[in-house]
C-alpha cells in the first residue's frame, strides 16, 4: 500500500512539497518528504519505522539543483535509540565529497566515537580525526592524522587526552618521513590547570 501527495504554489504552480508513504515487504513502513525552496534548493527526509512504531532508519538529504550537497543516515537499534550515523558533505560547485563523518552512539543518546575524513578538491584524503568520548562527558581521546594529499602518506599524527572536566592532560605529536618511519616524537603532560608538568 502506498500514497502520494503533492502541494503546489497557488500563484506560480511550482511544486512546494511532495509526500509519499509506503509499506515495505519486510513489514516496515517508509515515509518520504521533499520540500522545495527558493534558489533551486530542496530538503528531503526519509523515515523507516518498524511495525511497532520504533525508528529503524532516518535519511536526510539537501539538494542544490540536481546535485546532492549533504546526506546523513542514522541506523537505530530495536529499542529506537540511535546506533550509527554516517554523514556526507559535498562541495556545492563540484559535487565532490568534502567530509565524511561517522558516529557511534551509546544507548543514552550520547556519542561513543566519532570519525571525520576530510578531502581536497581532487578527492585526496587530507586529514582524519577520531574522538573517543567519556560515557557521561566530553572527549576522552582525540586523534588527528594529517596526510600528503598527493602521495596519501601520513606525515603527522597528534593524540590528545582529556579528563572528565574537559581539561587536556597530555599531547603526543609524531611526524613521519616519506617511508612512514617516525622522524620526531614530542610528548607533553599537563596538570588540571593546564600547566606542563613533564615533556619528552
Image (cartoon, rainbow, N blue to C red):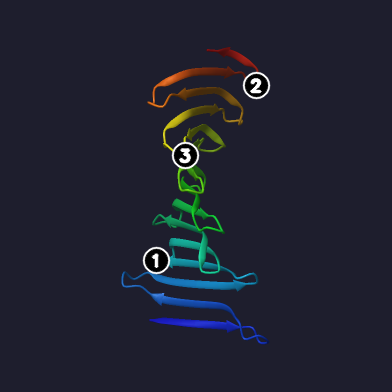
Which numbered disc flags the more N-terminal residue, 3 or 1?
1
- Would you name the residue on which mark 1 appears? 50
- Would you name the residue on which mark 2 appears? 194
Instruction: Report the Cα–Cα distance between label 3 and label 1.
Output: 43 Å
State the residue in front, 58 or 78.
58
Which numbered disc flags the more N-terminal residue, 2 or 1?
1
Instruction: Report the Cα–Cα distance between label 2 and label 1.
Output: 49 Å
Image disc number at residue 142? none
Instruction: Provide residue 137's location: percent of width, then percent of height.
Output: 56, 37
Residue drawn at (52%, 55%) of the image: 90
Which numbered disc flags the more N-terminal residue, 3 or 2?
3
Vertical comparison of 109 with 64: above or below: above
- Would you name the residue on which mark 3 appears? 149
> Seen from this angle, which residue lies furthest left?
25
| Secondary element at tag 3 | loop
Badge 3 density bin: few <14, some 14–19, many ≥20, Cα 10 Å: some
Say which of marks 2 and 1 sits in front: 2
Instruction: Report the Cα–Cα distance between label 3 and label 2.
Output: 34 Å
Badge 2 density bin: few <14, some 14–19, many ≥20, Cα 10 Å: few
Amino acid at each position: 500500500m502506498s500514497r502520494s501527495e503533492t502541494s503546489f504554489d497557488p500563484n506560480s504552480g511550482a511544486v512546494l512539497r511532495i509526500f509519499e508513504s509506503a509499506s515495505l515487504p519486510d513489514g516496515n513502513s517508509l515515509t518520504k518528504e521533499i520540500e522545495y525552496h527558493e534558489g533551486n534548493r530542496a530538503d528531503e527526509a526519509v523515515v523507516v519505522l518498524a511495525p511497532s512504531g520504533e525508528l529503524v532508519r532516518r535519511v536526510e538529504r539537501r539538494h542544490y539543483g540536481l546535485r546532492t550537497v549533504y546526506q546523513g543516515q542514522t541506523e537505530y537499534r530495536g529499542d529506537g535509540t540511535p546506533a550509527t550515523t554516517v554523514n556526507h558533505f559535498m562541495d556545492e560547485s563540484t559535487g565532490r565529497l568534502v567530509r565524511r563523518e561517522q558516529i557511534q552512539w551509546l544507548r543514552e543518546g550520547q556519542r561513543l566515537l566519532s570519525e571525520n575524513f576530510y578531502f581536497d578538491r581532487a578527492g585526496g584524503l587530507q586529514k582524519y580525526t577520531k574522538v573517543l568520548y567519556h560515557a557521561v562527558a566530553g572527549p576522552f581521546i582525540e586523534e588527528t592524522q594529517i596526510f600528503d594529499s598527493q602521495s596519501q602518506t601520513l606525515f603527522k599524527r597528534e593524540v590528545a587526552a582529556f579528563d572528565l572536566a574537559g581539561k587536556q592532560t597530555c599531547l603526543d605529536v609524531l611526524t613521519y618521513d616519506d617511508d612512514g618511519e617516525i622522524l620526531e616524537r614530542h610528548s607533553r603532560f599537563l596538570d588540571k590547570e593546564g600547566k606542563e608538568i613533564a615533556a619528552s
